Amino acid sequence: MNSLPPVIHVAVHRPFYSTLDYSYDPKSDEIPTGSRVEVKLAGRSTVGLVMGHSPTPTLADPKKLKPMTKLMDSEPILDAHLVELLTWSAQYYHEPIGEVVFTALPVLLRQQRPLNLPIWWQLKPTEQNPTADLQRAKRQLALYEWLKTQGGYVSEEAIAAWAGTGWRVVMRHLVEKGLVESTTLPPAQIEHIAAAPHLTLTDQQLDTVGHIQQTIEHPVLKPILLHGITGSGKTEVYLRVMAPILAQGKQVLVLVPEISLTPQLLNRFRTHYPHERMVCLHSALTDQERLQSWLQARQQQVRIIIGTRSAVFTPCPDLGLIVIDEEHDLSFKQQEGFRYHGRDLAIKRAQMLNVPIILGSATPSLETLHNATSGRFHYFHLAQRPGTAKPPSVQLQSTRGQSLRSGLSALTLTEIKQTLARHEQVMLFINRRGFAPVLKCSACGWSGQCEYCSANMTYHSRQGKLICHHCSVEKFVPEQCPHCGHHHLLTQGQGTERLELVLGQTFPQTPIIRIDRDSTSRKGALAERLQQVHDNPTAILVGTQMLAKGHDFPNLTLVVVLEADAALMSSEYHARERLGQLLVQVAGRAGRADKLGRVIIQTNHPENPALLTLLEHGYTIFAKQLLDERKRWHYPPFGYQALIRANAPELNEALEALDKIAEHLQLLGLGGVILLGPTTAMLEKRAGRYRTQLLLQSTQRKALHKLLNYLTQTTKQLKFPASVRWSIDVDPLDLT
Ligand code: ADP
Ligand code: ZN
Ligand code: ZN
């Protein structure tokens, strides 16, 4: 007989790359995978998630095996599929398993306390009328009658507010009489929204919907790329493809870049499916609300789940479709901690479950385009806008040798004037908030550097402050030069605040609406600004990246892009892909209705081949050229990369750490992986820490992963000083 106890493999919230084993007593406990357990770790009690079982201990010395303390959940909180997805993610991203699991769980489930869900109450449906029986219990009768008026579930707070203290006793009597029932989770309310009349699909949309429906009936599925120019009606296609899936009672998971930026999108889902229960998982939810939505998805009480990156981990027991809107968007990639890509994990999830997945974009990422051309993904193209809406005309305007007024050329100013005279809107796009990126002394050349970063601080005139955009440190603007005492400080370059000011002076009759992170930080401020845009047919919008996404501005006919050159000249190989995407997206804001849109890109490099290709031949050819270039260098998607980053208070510590890692890897043998570095990062110092990086690249994914595995299994041998922090970023998208 085997006397060794069976074990559970438990993920704890610590930086361990593998799960920990604990024993349990199979006679008294059944510990399902996906449940939370309490375990002892270094003498302290902590929460863990059961990732699997073994009939016998895997430890060399089973006597060291500790028993788990207690099962926390009466049923598993994660199903087998999610446990498998998380296990896979930890291996793929070389991330400690606990970090992965605890990133995926709602905050309230990460804590060591039982799930304290608020309770909701409602009358049980019943034939008999109990009021006669309750005549002698006045409080019970009153509560009963009140619940009747409420119709549906009522929260504890609402009951307490109406009935005052002591209501629980009264309620208990009603429960005992079988009149009232309670639940910890009321079904999501269906909001009463008027259905929008369904649009008549264009032939192209109809075709696409038909083709997508055919492909998703196929037993072997491939991801679907829906490449549709801005305004071609991709959202309309998602909505139609969803219909039969919802009709089968299945769930649809929709991932979007940033919900606060896409109120219009949400609204279209709501009004198209006013009778479907829907939740929205976004960063503005409280922990309680998030948990509630998460549980509703898990109990299948909601069927449309719309969320940002982390919503990819939402339990959906009957998932029928995943949609990733704006699949190219960088916000799907988490840039710290567990550095996963929400789109890629969604693709993996769809593949594991064999459910269809649609990736939509006007500017697909190079990886996705490559997957489509190589046949790994289906490809559908929407090349036209419905109705009379025409794509805008785009022109490059050379600023070389021109004298600019706060970054604006004379020609641009004339175009703005003419557009306003036609009572139309203008948008100026500049990717920098604040007034100016540099504040300088005209006498000695001093400039406002951040103490903690190797970067200038940005001058914000409204607040009268210098703010570092890398570490957020602020200080008041000095009245005189801190170096020589000179009284004349100058600004250099421009940001949104300066453009707002200058345009206000130039066009005093026109509302100037600035939309950036500063002007919209207050809750509701973005909605107000968008309303202003809506209310003022003649207006100038000044904004950052925030303006590039998703908004419909029917009266906007001129878009001006300022300072695109930095990205054009960047040595980061992703920069040009992103610039191309941004330009196409920004241009897509112009001329959405029946008016023709125009786009002006001011640049010092009007003969730049990449820009010219983009303008003359469009995004697809532009992307193909970039892909050819990447192929030559074996860059992704033709090769595989991982970036190891280190940081420390001293530069040499951060460099030495990576030297050590490089040596360590060389000892094993690189097996076809190239090491580039260690080097200092482009932003050498940030928030007081020096940053270095080591890039690993290979044409063999396996070789790269083998090396990273070895590294994570043997990190203890490296003995880094405590001041050094380091991390692994698989498929990095930001090499700065
Ligand atoms: P995309 O997601 O591709 O940018 P949308 O789905 O947001 O495009 O559609 C752009 C605009 O065109 C929206 O205002 C939408 O209501 C409208 N639209 C889409 N399809 C049709 C159609 N078949 N008929 C009329 N208007 C449409
Ligand atoms: Zn000075
Ligand atoms: Zn700083």
Image (spheres, rainbow, N blue to C red):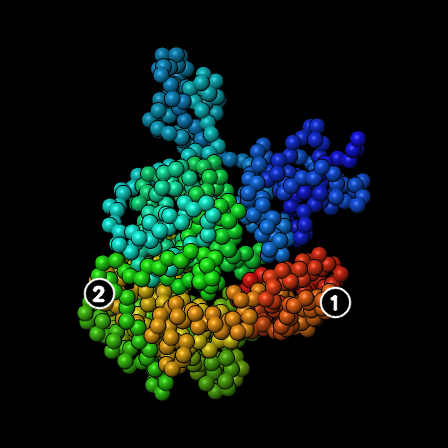
Is the residue 377 above or below the residue 165 in the image?
A: below
Q: Quadrant of the C terminus?
A: bottom right
SS class, disc 1: helix
Crowdedness near tag 1: few (<14), some (14–19) or many (≥20) residues, C-alpha within 10 Å: few
Quick check: 218 left or right of 77?
left
Asked whether residue 430 is in view, the answer is no
Give the amino acid type for the residue marked by disc 1 in the picture: Leu
Q: Position of residue 89 (x, y in %)?
A: 58, 52
Q: Image point 50% across, 86% down: which residue? A: 444
Ligand 1 falls in quadrant: bottom left
Residue behind mark 2: 595
| Distance from the alpha carbon under mark 1 to that under mark 2 | 64 Å
Q: Image point 45% across, 24% down: which residue? A: 181
Quick check: 14 left or right of 326?
right
Give the amino acid type for the residue marked by disc 2 in the picture: Lys
Foreground disc of the pair 1, 2: 1
Is the residue 493 above or below the residue 91 in the image?
A: below
In the depicted view, which residue is nearer to us: 293 or 151?
293
In the depicted view, which residue is nearer to us: 266 or 349?
349
Asked whether residue 399 is in view, the answer is yes
